[in-house]
Amino acid sequence: MNPDGWVFIVDRKKDMINASGYKVWPREVEDVLAQHPAVRESAVVGVPDEKRGETVKAFVSLKPGATTTPEELIAHCKERMAAYKYPRVIELIDELPKTVTGKILRRELRG
C-alpha cells in the first residue's frame, strides 16, 4: 500500500497460497529469504497439505561457496514473518528452472 492508500498486487493471483484460510503471496516469502546471506535466489509455491489445505514450500538456490540448511532458512523466515507465512518445507537446489528470458517457472516446481 502506498502513502495515498492505493494497494498494488505485485504477484499473480494464481500463485497466491491459501494456508488454513490465510493468504500468502510467494513474493513476501521470497523477499524474506533474499535477506539471508547464503541465498542466491528462491521460488515459493503452495503444495497440498492435509491439515492446512495448502502449505508454503520454498525452493532455494545458494550463492557459490555458501552453506546453510533448510532448518536454518526456516528459522530465519520464522523470526521475520507471521506464523502462517513462513515455509514449512525448503528444498535446496542448484538452479531454479527458468524461461529463456530468465523468469522462474513455478509450475515446474509444483509438479
Image (cartoon, rainbow, N blue to C red):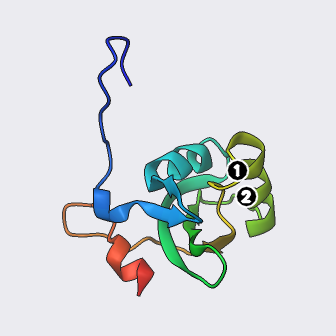
Q: Secondary structure at mark 1?
A: helix
Rendered location of residue 92, percent (x, y):
62, 73
Determine which quarter of the picture holds residue 71.
bottom right
Q: Secondary structure at mark 2?
A: helix
Residue at horizontal 19 percent and vertical 61 percent from the top: 101
How many numbered circles are shown?
Answer: 2
Assess disc 1: are there few (<14), some (14-19) or many (≥20) residues with their C-alpha within 10 Å of its C-alpha: many
**What is the three-letter code of the residue carrying label 2?**
Leu
Residue where numbered disc 1 is placed:
77
Left or right: where 68 falls relative to 65? right
**Labels 1 and 2 touching (C-beta < 8 A):** yes
Determine which quarter of the picture holds residue 6.
top left
Rendered location of residue 3, percent (x, y):
38, 12
Residue at horizontal 52 percent and vertical 51 percent from the top: 30
Determine which quarter of the picture holds residue 62.
bottom right
Left or right: where 59 falls relative to 72? left
Residue 91 sits above or below residue 56 on the image: below
Identity of the residue furthest to the front in this view: 21
Assess disc 2: are there few (<14), some (14-19) or many (≥20) residues with their C-alpha within 10 Å of its C-alpha: many
**What is the three-letter code of the residue carrying label 1?**
Cys
Residue 80 sits above or below residue 56 on the image: above
Rendered location of residue 54, percent (x, y):
54, 74
Residue at horizontal 69 percent and vertical 58 percent from the top: 66
Residue at horizontal 19 percent and vertical 68 percent from the top: 100
**Camera-side residue of 40 and 10:** 10
Residue where numbered disc 2 is placed:
73
Residue 104 sits above or below residue 32 on the image: below
**Camera-side residue of 92 and 14:** 14
Q: Quadrant of the N terminus?
A: top left
Residue 50's tag is none
Q: For the residues marked 1 and 2, what is the alpha-carbon distance in whole angstroms?
A: 6 Å
Identity of the residue furthest to the left in this view: 101
